[in-house]
Amino acid sequence: MKPWAGRFEKDTAGPVEEFTASIAFDTRLYQEDIAGSIAHARALAACGAISSEEGDALAVGLREVQRDIEAGAATFSTSDEDVHTAVERLLAEKVGDLAKKLHTGRSRNDQVALDTRLYVRREAGHLAGLIDDLRGALVDVAEANADVIMPGYTHMQHAQPVLLAHHLLAHFEMLTRDAERLADAARRANVSPLGSGALAGTAYAVDREAVARELGCCGITRNSIDAVSDRDFVMEILASIAITMVHLSRLAEEIVLWASQEFGFVELDDAFATGSSMMPQKKNPDVAELVRGKVGRVVGDLVAVLTVMKGLPLAYNRDMQEDKESLFDAVDTVASCLQVMAPMVRTMKVNAKAMREAAGKGFTTATDVADYLVRKGIPFREAHAAVGRLVLKCVQEGKGFGDLTLDEWKAIAPGVSQDVLNVVSVEASLEARAVPGGTAPARVREAIAAARAMLGRRSGG
Ligand code: ARG
């Protein structure tokens, strides 16, 4: 029997029941739904809407329902419509007619808003933990390869040498902000809408603050219409997840490139690569490719919810039920990506020799030569042009900086002497970049230690 059957003369048509039901996907909110219902039952008892014995019996029955669901002993059907009605039906099987009092002063509109908020809070914490695992993997690889030098790129062209650790810590920084964004989204989601009723506020004198405290929320929503209309907490976590996915895909793309024959910078562990059904020699970075590919669906999830919400009049509209599959899909997808990325990164073998060789190619210390000329009193623009001409000459003659004679060096500008050879090395170029945030080995060692300390603080609570 539908909770709203009184007004109706006919049963819902079968296809309509199927079409409108969310039970196929919203049962994952059962914990939140039951926690909210227990808090609501207590609040009803506290304000005298039901007796305290009834409040206690409802709470006991709801806990039994939770145990049954967790033991797989509860069954759901399409006629339940959604998780809220299903829990109430299962409760009636435990406490009989008393279950009919639970929905006093409550609507599924404030109920679903609460459940979804609590779910966002829970998953934001879970995802931040998974992000931390990947951050930890990046720091581990950075530390184990602290002196490995690679070419830094701009426009995918060799630019300046950097430490591999410095490059990996760039990804660490992005993921740090991702975790912060999730925490921020969770903080804003963590307020209780219970007591807002269908839209106008409940007519029972429930202590909304006490309900919020019981649920671990940091406050209550201030406006009952907003409370049942707002889904920006869903859009916010989806946006945070989408940004995280974009970051994961950039890391994944680099792993794909680095594992290629052209780069040969890393070799993936066999457990994190796949083969070809036809070509026996292949070892493919499918995991990284899938991570890169899954961004598509997560960005789609965000866009789906933004589009559902756009133009909806206040207050609750059934359109909003469409928020859940997108939310759940994005959470599941980013979680699975993080779970495979962390061990894949941690186990990949770094080819220090290939990276070091590449770092010296492509005149990556040309800026250092220009800086040397600046120290000899030549304005930077002129220095830049002089070194540019030298590079052109080298390209035309098929030479690298290392092949030039001292006379050829001296020819580029007045004042050049033997000591120019001290600045053209890749190692000297790194050492020179000792500003905070730069790639000088001492700075990067500090950055690794700081990253470790940051992770320690987080896992230490
Ligand atoms: N399944 C619904 C949702 O996800 C719950 C709220 C239904 N409320 C209503 N008045 N029909 O949004």
Image (tube, rainbow, N blue to C red):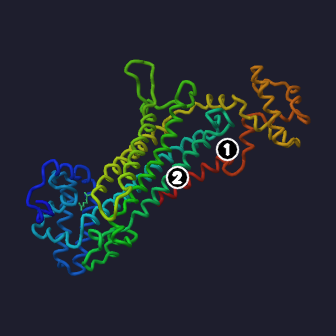
Q: Is residue 391 above or below residue 377?
A: above
- Residue found 47% across the figure and 60% down from its top: 184
416 vs 289, left or right, is right
Between 198 and 89, which is closer to the camera in this rendering? 198
Q: Which mark is residue 439?
A: 1
Please name the residue shown 57% across and 40% down the image: 144
On the question of residue 305 being in view, the answer is yes
Along the line of sight, which residue is nearer the eye, 10 or 442? 10
- Disc 2: which residue: 176
Q: What element carries label 2?
A: helix
Of labels 1 and 2, earlier in sequence is: 2
Please give the name of the residue rendered at 72% of the width and 35% of the height, measured from the top-left corner.
Answer: 426
* Residue 449 appears left or right of 199: right
What amino acid type should be assigned to the residue bearing mark 1?
Thr
Which quadrant of the figure shows ligand 1? bottom left
Secondary structure under the numbered disc 1 in the rendered image: loop
